[in-house]
Amino acid sequence: MNIKNSETGGNKPVETYQDQLEQALLEFETSQQLRLDETVRSALGARGSALTTKKDRIYTHPVPHLSNHGSYIFGNISVPADIEDGKSDFTNVLFVATPNYLLTVLVDPSWVYNARFGEAVLNIYQQHADNGNESQVSKTLIRLLNICVSTLDHSLDSLNHRFRRSKEKIGAINVRDGKTLEQEVDKRYSSIQDLDIEINSLTTIIEQLEIMLSQIENHEIIISIRDSDFAFFDNDSRKSANGIRIQALHLVSYQRALVFDCASLIKKMDRLQEKALTLATHRITAFGAAILIPNLLYDFFGQTFTSGQSLPKIVLDNGWTISLALTASYWIFQYIWFKRKRYI
């Protein structure tokens, strides 16, 4: 049985989801003649478990994993549901399984509906149910892991596209244009920092996914039935896990490369910000000089050049004219200089 919690997606109200989850857990325990650990029930969000009131934590702090619990296994895979403005929310597929019974719990954050991934998971589970729940549980789990890898690859491609666009725009900034440089740094800096946070938010789920596939490939998921131990995943499933793990390792490298590139771009933005501050200081100094220099001249010579200095007679006779001409010429020169330096 598949349970889905999504208010905005319209699949099930929270109360309906909770009731169906409790019923599904009861059916699983009854049919398989076992009792789920309290830690597992808490992670699934069952009523009465210690972490039920805190289950929203899984949306912002997902910990994908795969573990054996005696006669059954429990796991969780996570993919991004919404990555925007420096925040990441996740869709989780939690599952408990025996060799002949699979229960999956697909949980979206209540404020996000992850339609693309959700529909893929529902289709995989429906195909599994149509073939009978007891058939090829391990192969269905491998298919779920595969769609998780594909979804993460798509998410990284989207983040990489945003990064390349930002890098191109930053590379096109004229660093000699002080005014434009300030505007572009103010405009781009926060978005690059948000992108860095979003890329880093995928570290745990990608690395844990690779670890899960490694566990399957290396024969580490063992269950015990009637005092006998055997591998939960058969040879075909382990071979499939090997191929998917290669893709997951590619995702690990891909994500780490993006982390490095984004960190390098942030360092470049730091340098541009320092340059913008330097140019702003130069601009303030230039404006101060534009006001101060004429005042210094007139303080020394007098506004009409009649301060008693030994000046030529033509200067003394035309002091006001020279004063006005000097002031106008100086301001014209300053205007041209300011325009050249993009101070105005």
Image (tube, rainbow, N blue to C red):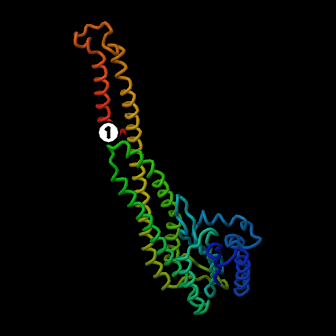
Q: Quadrant of residue 140?
A: bottom right
The spot of residue 186 in percent (x, y) is 45, 48
Q: Nearer the viewer, residue 253 or 168?
A: 168
Disc 1 element? helix
Q: Quadrant of residue 221?
A: bottom right
Q: Nearer the viewer, residue 280 or 71?
A: 280
Which quadrant, please, contains the C terminus? top left
Q: Is residue 50 left or right of residue 199?
A: right
Is residue 94 something that shows in the picture? Answer: no
How packed mark 1 is, by other alpha carbons closer than 10 Å (few <14, some 14-19, many 20 or more), is few
The answer to whether 243 is drawn above or below residue 136 in the figure is above
Which quadrant, please, contains the N terminus? bottom right
Q: Looking at this rendering, what residue extends furthest in the bottom direction? A: 131
The spot of residue 106 in percent (x, y) is 61, 76
**Callout 1 amino acid:** Lys
Q: Is residue 159 left or right of residue 329?
A: right
Number of numbered callouts drawn? 1
Q: Quadrant of residue 119?
A: bottom right
The answer to whether 289 is drawn above or below residue 182 in the figure is above
The spot of residue 302 in percent (x, y) is 34, 13
**What residue is disc 1 on?**
339
Is residue 92 something that shows in the picture? Answer: yes
Q: Looking at this rendering, what residue extends furthest in the right direction? A: 48
The spot of residue 220 in percent (x, y) is 54, 75
The answer to whether 153 is drawn above or below residue 34 in the figure is above
